[in-house]
Amino acid sequence: MSAQSGLAASLSAKELQLVPPQAARLSSISLPGSRGIRPPLKWAGGKRWLVSHVAALYDQHRNKRLIEPFCGALAVTLGVLPDKAILNDVNSHPINFYNRLKRGLKVSIDMVNDEEFYYRHRQEFNNLILANREDSKEAAELFYYLNRTGYNGLCRFNKRGLFNVPFGKYKNISYRYDFSDYASVFKDWYFVNGDFELLDVTSKDFLYADPPYDVEFRQYAQQGFDWQDQVRLADWLAIHRGPVVVSNQATERIIELYKKRRFTIAILDAPRMISCTGDRAKAKEILAYRNI
Ligand SMILES: C[S@@+](CC[C@H](N)C(=O)[O-])C[C@H]1O[C@@H](n2cnc3c(N)ncnc32)[C@H](O)[C@@H]1O
């Protein structure tokens, strides 16, 4: 396997510098222990644990705009807190929600951790999708409620594009109604909905890409992102003339993909476990970077 870099080991001092002063003032949304701002959504594959690693690379480029083509729950951007950012995802619902947060969203629907109530709100959300009103304030509020109350914070749709995540059965949920503190954090961040390749980036931008994981031994592609998309992404990142960082599951073919394109490779232990020939082992994550 590829060289283990000294990256992870050298991070703790830098970690302490993560939070610009404005974050400390936003106490209602800042995370304990100086680790940036609390992501308002739950997300499969969220990368909070990678924040210190990406921050160590971004800190040398703080004057640059941060581009996240696969922003998901914003865990990394909210940890790194750039002044300027372009945050993209192919999923329109979190993007609508963030655009509403930028405008100081205050949730006006009731939010209750109850099964019947959940399925009623899920139906209302799907009615908005069917009526092409998925970019409305109401859709953003319902999306937040479903994200907190549904099973594991999953965001899954059926073939008709309707949200089909079951009730989450959590004991307690604390809902936030007032998101106005996020407006100042998001002021110079722009949210875009589309495929990563449509993004308009310049050589002055710092790119951090966290695509859906490569799943080597399964037939289906996770979230519709197959091997050809992984190759398309690696090619797109390799022609970027500015600094670029990408994370992914450290499968053999992903390591090869980025090695061939002259990326520096670091292999990290992810906090999740995988089952490996009957044993439980820590999953390996790749952090590949260039032009840093
Ligand atoms: C691993 S998640 C990103 C998680 C994020 N880094 C975080 O910490 O919350 C991958 C994201 O890529 C998005 N995605 C999938 N295919 C995409 C595409 N072709 N272009 C842009 N985004 C895509 C998914 O909707 C998902 O939110």
Image (cartoon, rainbow, N blue to C red):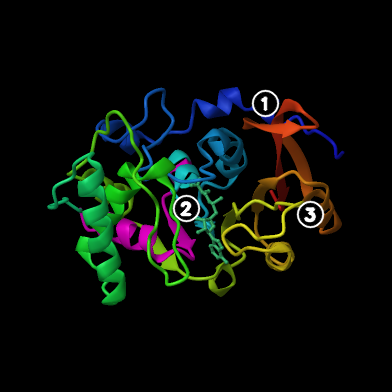
Q: Secondary structure at mark 1?
A: helix
Residue 16 as seen in the image, left or right of residue 217: left
Q: Position of residue 172 (x, y in %)?
A: 27, 29
Q: Is mark 2 within 8 Å of ligand 1?
A: yes
Residue 291 as seen in the image, left or right of residue 118: right
- Can you tell which quarter of the image residue 102 is in? bottom left
Residue 172 as seen in the image, left or right of residue 266: left
Instruction: Tell me the number on the disc at residue 10.
Output: 1
Q: Position of residue 72 (x, y in %)?
A: 47, 53
Q: Is residue 102 magenta?
A: yes
Residue at which label 2 appears: 72
91 to 245, vertically: above or below: below
151 to 254, vertically: above or below: above
In 3D space, how far apart are the residues under numbered discs 3 and 1 (Cα atoms)? 23 Å
| Amino acid type assigned to the residue bearing label 2 in the image | Gly
Q: Position of residue 251 (x, y in %)?
A: 78, 46
The mark lying in front, picked from 1 and 2, is 2
Q: Disc 3 or 1, which lies upstream in sequence?
A: 1
Residue at which label 3 appears: 258
On-image quarter of the N terminus: top right
Q: Position of residue 236 (x, y in %)?
A: 68, 67
Which residue is drawn at the image coordinates 50% and 43% (left, top)?
76
| Amino acid type assigned to the residue bearing label 1 in the image | Ser
In 3D space, how far apart are the residues under numbered discs 1 and 2 (Cα atoms)? 27 Å
| Amino acid type assigned to the residue bearing label 3 in the image | Tyr
The mark lying in front, picked from 3 and 1, is 3
Which residue is drawn at the image coordinates 38% and 49% (left, top)?
166
Which residue is drawn at the image coordinates 40% and 43% (left, top)?
151
Residue 118 seen in this snapshot = yes
Q: Which residues are magenta?
A: 80-104
Residue nearer the viewer, 3 or 106:
106
Circle 3 crowding by C-alpha within 10 Å: few under 14, some 14–19, many from 20 = many
